[in-house]
Image (tube, coloured by chain):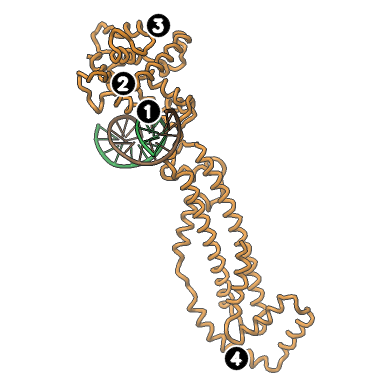
Chain colours: A orange, B green, C brown
DNA sequence: GCACATGATTGCAA
DNA sequence: TTGCAATCATGTGC
């Protein structure tokens, strides 16, 4: 990263090595002043000799004349157009949260969550990785920027001092000084631009690796799947968890709320498409929950949302019966005490109320035929349309 | 390598 | 905004 080493001589050359006697004389003199080849004594002696030289005034006027000519070229170099690329880089670094100083906690996360396709609730490993690496990039960027700025300040002071020194033997206008400072700044800003560009590239690479790989997925843990399935099958008549429930499920499963939403979206549609395929799973989970309910006893559930509604169980049971034939229950284990209770509850539930009102929870299960209406007589083996049969 | 499972994304409609 | 449906892309078991 030794850009300073290559830049400094370049600027010096650009500033002092210009064609013409003035620059040549000045450079040589100043160069020696800054160097260690000559003693201060001999240096002062030369200066004195120069100032007392009888030709000094004549030489000075010649220098002024030449200066007048070179000033024109200076004028031509002024007023660079604003750098659009630098602006873009600045904007991007600002947007990525690199330009502004690092904030702790939420501030640091903001950069990551503002990304397209990023999930606001996503605390995945990838995102924490991203934030950590972005933080590293930010630190490097700021330390390098600080270094360059300091170097720029030092060098500007250095050159200004040299020019002041030179102004004793040659005409150095304040305009020329400003011009020289401008050159230095432009050189340093070129370096800064390079730094910004590299930083942008690093951020883009990081993003493409960790954030934009949106389709990267990992299967949920067994626990997460179980939590979700338990809820789904125990609320089969209305598998639409509320926001609070989603949060609860997310917490239980160690996943995000949006992942819970995705999962339920996928599950509903896949269950609806192929109910038969999910029979075993349904049986397993409803069996589980009913056993759990039995073990806990009535009222054992803290949340009524987690308690399987009779309608759900009835539906699962009927699903089972219809797919396996009314005489047998296929894989559904009717031998356990819990399932006996379940059957009784189901039968009790299926009793039409005195007012003759339709079975409410089962009516809710119309989600399965909400958008793709199922025919009243379903094909053999497809028990997905039984709800309409029952509720009718 | 293939088929299937599954989480994520996208476009659309209500 | 939410959910559905289709689709994509990756994981997994064989």
Residue A55 appears anywhere in the view: yes
Tell me the subunit letter for badge 4: A
Q: Secondary structure at mark 3?
A: loop
Measure the C-alpha gap from mark 2 to mark 1: 18 Å
Q: Residue A155: x and y, percent? A: 63, 69
Mark 3 and mark 2, same subunit?
yes
Tell me the subunit letter for badge 1: A
Residue A258 appears anywhere in the view: no
Mark 1 or 3 closer to N-term? 1
Q: Identify the residue position indicated by label 1 in the image.
A: A264
Q: Residue at x 59, y 53 (%)?
A: A140
Q: Identify the residue position indicated by label 2 in the image.
A: A276
Q: Identify the residue position indicated by label 3 in the image.
A: A335
Quadrant in the rendering for residue A47: bottom right
Circle nearer the viewer, 2 or 1: 2
* Quadrant that contains the C terminus of chain A: top left
Tell me the subunit letter for badge 3: A
Q: Residue B2: x and y, percent? A: 36, 36
Circle nearer the viewer, 4 or 1: 1
Mark 4 neighbour density, 10 Å: few (under 14) some (14–19) many (20 or more): some
Q: Identify the residue position indicated by label 4 in the image.
A: A62
Do residues under tags 4 and 1 come within 8 Å of each other at their CB atoms?
A: no
> In the shown orientation, is residue A372 left or right of residue A120?
left
Circle nearer the viewer, 1 or 3: 3
Mark 1 and mark 3, same subunit?
yes
């Amino acid at each position: 990263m030794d850009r300073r080493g290559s830049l400094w001589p370049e600027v010096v050359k650009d500033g002092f090595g210009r064609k013409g006697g003035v620059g040549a004389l000045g450079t040589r003199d100043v160069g020696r002043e800054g160097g260690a080849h000559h003693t201060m004594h001999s240096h002062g002696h030369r200066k004195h000799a120069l100032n007392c030289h009888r030709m000094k005034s004549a030489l000075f006027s010649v220098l002024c004349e030449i200066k007048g000519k070179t000033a024109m070229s200076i004028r031509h170099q002024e007023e660079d157009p604003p750098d659009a690329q630098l602006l873009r880089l600045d904007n991007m670094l600002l947007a990525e949260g690199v330009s502004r100083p690092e904030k702790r906690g939420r501030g640091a996360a903001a950069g990551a969550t503002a990304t397209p396709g990023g999930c606001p609730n996503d605390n995945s490993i990838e995102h924490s990785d991203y934030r950590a690496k972005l933080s590293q990039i930010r630190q490097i960027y700021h330390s390098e920027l600080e270094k360059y700025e300091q170097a720029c300040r030092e060098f500007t002071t250095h050159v200004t001092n040299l020019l002041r020194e030179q102004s004793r033997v040659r005409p150095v206008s304040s305009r020329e000084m400003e011009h020289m400072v401008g050159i230095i700044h432009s050189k340093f800003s070129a370096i800064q631009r390079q730094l910004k560009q590299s930083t942008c590239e690093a951020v883009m690479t990081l993003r493409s690796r960790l954030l934009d790989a949106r389709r990267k997925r990992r299967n949920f843990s067994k626990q997460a799947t179980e939590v979700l399935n338990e809820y789904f099958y125990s609320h089969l008549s209305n598998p639409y968890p509320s926001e609070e429930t989603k949060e609860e499920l997310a917490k239980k499963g160690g996943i995000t709320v949006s992942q819970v939403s995705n999962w339920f979206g996928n599950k509903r549609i896949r269950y609806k498409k192929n109910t038969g395929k999910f029979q075993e799973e349904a049986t397993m989970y409803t069996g589980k929950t009913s056993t759990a309910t039995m073990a806990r006893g009535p009222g054992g559930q803290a949340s009524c949302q987690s308690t399987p509604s009779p309608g759900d169980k009835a539906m699962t049971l009927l699903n089972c019966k219809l797919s396996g034939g009314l005489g047998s229950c296929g894989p559904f284990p009717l031998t356990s005490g819990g399932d006996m209770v379940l059957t009784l509850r189901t039968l009790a539930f299926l009793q039409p109320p005195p007012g003759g009102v339709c079975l409410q929870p089962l009516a809710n299960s119309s989600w399965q035929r909400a958008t793709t209406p199922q025919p009243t007589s379903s094909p053999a083996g497809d028990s997905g349309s039984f709800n309409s049969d029952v509720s009718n």
